[in-house]
């Protein structure tokens, strides 16, 4: 592994700017019918539940940085909208696990398709070979870091 610290830090700064710009280019791609129904924190909560089905309300509150009372109200609202289901933990009935309903899954999948389209538009500025190189290089970097940190993909 090269130890060109100054150059690596400069590249990291540039890469961070690229990521921030990429986020700006894709974050506002939420359909109006979702934006009108859900505040951003609830949309973020749906994404977290999508990637971690069965997450506890307590852990979701910690990730979102909100109080247990606030998460309880938010989850109740998401349940009322039929986007989230609360189920008792199989080992501890006092612990509630959160899962997306079919409607919640559909919202996340719709948003992912829109964001994927926005990223594809960005990648289209490059040749197919360059697109492959960008994606494969980033995948390799992520894999190395996951292995270093013993994180499952």
Image (spheres, rainbow, N blue to C red):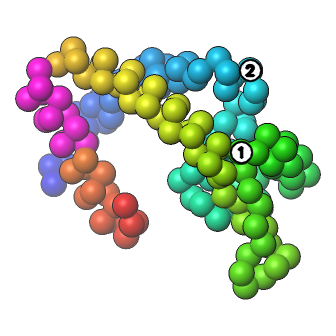
Magenta highlight range = 127-138
Q: Which mark is residue 93?
A: none
Q: Report helix, strand or loop for mark 1.
A: loop
At x 80%, y 48%, the residue is 79
Disc 2 to disc 1, C-alpha distance: 15 Å
User: Residue 148's x, y, as percent?
Assistant: 31, 65
Residue that label 1 marks: 83
The single residue placed furthest to the top in the displayed view is 125
Q: Specify the quadrant of the image occupied by residue 55.
A: bottom right
Q: Which mark is residue 36?
A: 2
Q: Is residue 47 left or right of residue 149?
A: right
User: Residue 127's x, y, as percent?
Assistant: 11, 20
> Is residue 12 something that shows in the picture?
yes
The single residue placed furthest to the front in the displayed view is 102
Please say if 113 is above or below 24: below
As for residue 136 lying within the magenta part, the answer is: yes
Q: Report helix, strand or loop for mark 2.
A: loop
User: Local crowd at mark 1 within 10 Å, few (<14), some, or many (≥20)?
Assistant: some
At x 79%, y 40%, the residue is 81
Please say if 101 is above or below 57: above
At x 55%, y 19%, the residue is 28
Q: Quadrant of the N terminus?
A: bottom left
User: Residue 15's x, y, as percent?
Assistant: 33, 29
- Seen from the viewer's position, the closer of residues 8 and 83 is 83
Q: Is residue 101 left or right of residue 144?
A: right
- Seen from the viewer's position, the closer of residues 152 and 110 is 110
Q: Specify the quadrant of the image occupied by residue 7.
A: top left
Give the mark, 2 or 1, whose residue is nearer the N terminus: 2
Do the residues under discs 2 and 1 have CB atoms within 8 angstroms? no
How would you classify the magenta stretch by its main secondary structure?
helix
């Amino acid at each position: 592994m090269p130890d060109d610290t100054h150059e690596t830090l400069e590249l990291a700064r540039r890469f961070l700017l690229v990521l921030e710009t990429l986020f700006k280019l894709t974050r506002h791609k939420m359909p109006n019918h979702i934006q009108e129904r859900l505040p951003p924190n609830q949309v973020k909560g749906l994404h977290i539940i999508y990637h971690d089905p069965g997450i506890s309300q307590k852990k979701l509150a910690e990730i979102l940085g909100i109080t247990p009372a606030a998460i309880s109200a938010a989850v109740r609202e998401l349940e009322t909208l039929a986007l989230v289901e609360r189920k008792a933990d199989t080992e501890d009935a006092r612990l509630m696990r959160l899962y997306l309903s079919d409607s919640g899954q559909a919202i996340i999948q719709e948003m992912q398709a829109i964001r994927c389209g926005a990223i594809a538009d960005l990648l289209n500025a490059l040749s197919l070979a360059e697109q492959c190189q960008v994606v494969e290089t980033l995948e390799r970097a992520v894999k190395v870091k996951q292995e270093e940190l013993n994180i499952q993909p």
